[in-house]
């Protein structure tokens, strides 16, 4: 059974499969760089909608 959870990058609101940590390379890199952003710019519709963009 596959359970979705939130992307590990703090500002991102995307859901990812249990085996994944990030929804995209963008979020993976931003998290590694400890980006101090309050909004995510991964570009996924789910995240844009959750942020009201």
Image: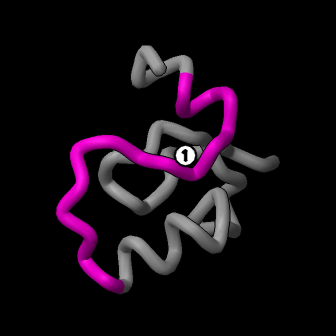
Main SS of the magenta part reads: loop
Q: Is residue 45 above or below residue 32?
A: above
Outermost residue on the bottom side: it is 32
Name the residue rendered at 77%, 49% in the picture.
2
Assess disc 1: are there few (<14), some (14-19) or many (≥20) residues with their C-alpha within 10 Å of its C-alpha: some
Q: Which residues are magenta?
A: 33-48
Q: Is residue 34 magenta?
A: yes
Location of mark 1 (residue): 5
Name the residue rendered at 31%, 83% in the picture.
33
Q: Quadrant of residue 34?
A: bottom left
Give the x, y percent position of residue 17. Answer: 71, 54
Name the residue rendered at 55%, 18% in the picture.
49
Give the x, y percent position of residue 43. Answer: 63, 43
- For this rendering, which residue is in front, 28 or 1? 28
Q: Is residue 23 above or below residue 14?
A: below
Outermost residue on the left side: it is 36
Q: Would residue 53 appear left or right of 4 to someone viewing this image? A: left
Q: Is residue 15 magenta?
A: no
- For this rendering, which residue is in front, 2 or 5? 5
Give the x, y percent position of residue 26. Answer: 57, 68
- For this rendering, which residue is in front, 5 or 48? 48
């Amino acid at each position: 059974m596959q359970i979705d959870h939130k992307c590990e990058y703090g500002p991102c609101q995307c859901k990812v499969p249990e085996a994944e940590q990030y929804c995209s390379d963008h979020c993976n890199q931003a998290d590694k760089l400890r980006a101090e952003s309050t909004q995510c710019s991964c570009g996924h519709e789910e995240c844009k909608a959750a942020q009201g963009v």
